Image: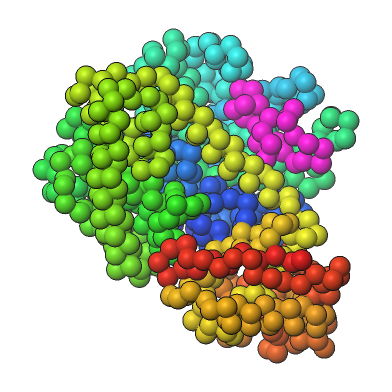
Amino acid sequence: MTVSEVRKRFLAFYEARGHVVIPSAPIVPGNDPTTLFTSSGMQPLLPYFLGKDHPEGKRVVNSQLAFRAGDIEEVGDNRHTTFFEMLGNWSFGDYFKQEQLPWIFEFLTSTETGFGIDPSKLYVTVFAEDKEAGIALDTEAVELWKRLFKEKGVDAEFSNIGSEADGYLKGMGPSDRIFAYDAKKNWWSRSGVPSNMPAGEPGGPDSEIFYDFGTPHDPKWGANCHPNCDCGRFVEIGNSVFMQFVKKEDGSFEELPKKNIDFGGGLERITMATVGPDIFMLDIFDAARAVIEERSGKKYGEDEATTRAFRIILDHMRASTFILAEGILPSNTEAGYVLRRLLRRAIRESDRLGIKDAVLADVAKGYGQAYADQYPHVLANALKIAEEIEKEEEKFRKTLTSGMRELEKLVAKDTVTPEDVFTLFTSYGFPVELTEEIANEREIEIDLAGVLELMKKHQETSRAGGAQRFAGGLADHAEQTVRYHTTHHILLKALQMVLGSEVKQRGSNITSERLRIDFASPTKMTDEQKAEVERIVNEVIYQDLPVTRTVMAREEAEKLGAEMEFGVKYPDMVSVYSVGPIHATEETPDIPNAFSLEFCGGPHVANTSEIHADGRKFRIQKEEAVASGVRRIKGVLE
């Protein structure tokens, strides 16, 4: 079965059960200052779990594009990827466990309405008790799973594995199929385990589903195998989160008045059940894999090193293709930096395969066609994607030349410190393993443990920073941040008035201290143009115009000329924010005459008078280039 067929079956299954199919949010959120990438299906929907009404109702389903930069180092085995699609179904205060678990089990095992997996290949986990939090074992989920497996004629005993502290030492019995793990494995909240959650934070137990590929257990991961073992026998294919509790001021927990369901299932991992324990043998990789085989003269799977190189190229180029399709270009900051890192790692692996000429653009072409039915914007941007990849590949080969010169200087000293190796990597993009290879050739010892420690600290800092942005920003609806958000809308319109209607937003970052907008424009702004933009923004702000949210049909909003995020597929009903005109009210918004009109989820001020309440005016702090054809403005209210 193809990836496209599985996606269609999942969406149709839940649509038949009252869910509205919503489009994937962008993989690079244009108006979210809290994170570089969309990393899960629920991330764009978090406001609706926190009480906001979804315009499509209480039941929605989709397949969400996702990227996790923290998984870059994991790529190379049979199942880890940085880019993936997350199948998801959600209930906002509607159904709960009694509906969710039977439905997802039916989808996975039914040959008539679902995917048709052999139920004897499935194993599940549930939440064990947390004595400190006063939350008991999820016996409701245990009993549900026992019944569901029994109905399929599969023995399903319950086994309480325990905690990470004891290493999950208990082995599996022949009928063990339902396993309880502690909060580190089977609890979800934005803050992690219950003890880390602040008062007022929602969270709850979850229940994961694993597919058993039956591969031999590798004892290096422990004496006994179990569903959460990392040996590769079991692969997680889905997780139902039961958002059931809220933490009280005294540290105890109480049940939410409206409970939510958040299911996430890896589309590619589910489809793996049809091809065996190798995600890179899925049909979506066929064309790209054929290009690498032809250009390298090697076959995928012929040996461990070759297979690993193939996998890194296949994964990184798929991720790069989708990121480029949304208008992000390689750069030295934020999403552009991650994109550059992906491309450069892929170049290095193509070198390992003996491919010395440019090849990555040809690899990328296969993904446009593979995803044409669901994500046509990738194929539509194929020429631009190929052009940017070719430029980056040429640039990096020059970087490698520069890095080699620096390395030769270090080698001449007969001493290469861990700091030297780390600097070559961070400043020149020079791969650590290449430095290691050359120093061995020259019989120069390198403190690899020291290098690994520096790299580990760098990765931990990066991941902590990303987590902080995600966790902190989601809750940041501070007054000044909201002011900047509305000012951002006004600024975009002012830029179009001064520079031309072809100016389109390519990204943003809004905090309580400043706003930032990236926009498509080929030339640097003149001082006169910047002054005129400032004048327009301040003039609008001081007109005390109402800011109104209206839910309308997408086609109607498009006819009105509402600004849209680049690369986003919107649902049939959308939220639109208008700034002005002065005679508009919330009950009778005069949208056609508004100064600014944008697709947006909010939040915003109710009136622009709130922006200048303390006498502040907008000022452009900096205007600069961030990529070819993309400019950036940082602005402040002071």
> Is residue 265 in view?
yes
Q: Which residues are magenta?
A: 180-204
On screen, residue 336 above or below 534: above
- Which residue corresponds to the image point at 56% horizontal and 73% vertical from the top-left? 564
Report which quarter residue 434 is drawn in. Answer: top left
Position of residue 575 in the picture relative to residue 425 (left or right)? right
> Is residue 142 in view?
no
Position of residue 263 in the picture relative to residue 363 (left or right)? right
Which residue is outermost to the front?
Answer: 413
Identify which residue, 183 or 240, lies in the foreground. 183
On screen, residue 387 above or below 266: below
**Could you say where residue 274 lies in the image, as x and y percent from the top left?**
33, 41
Report which quarter residue 19 is drawn in. Answer: bottom right
**Could you say where residue 85 lies in the image, as x and y percent from the top left?**
46, 50
Identify which residue, 447 or 458, lies in the foreground. 447
- Which residue corresponds to the image point at 40% horizontal and 56% vertical from the top-left? 330
**Could you say where residue 21 lies in the image, as x and y percent from the top left?**
55, 61
Position of residue 5 in the picture relative to residue 399 (left or right)? right
On screen, residue 227 above or below 569: above
Q: Is residue 203 magenta?
A: yes
- Report the coloring of the rendering: rainbow
- Which residue corresponds to the image point at 80% horizontal and 69% vertical from the top-left? 616
Task: Quadrant for the C terminus, please.
Answer: bottom right
Identify which residue, 97 or 589, lies in the foreground. 589
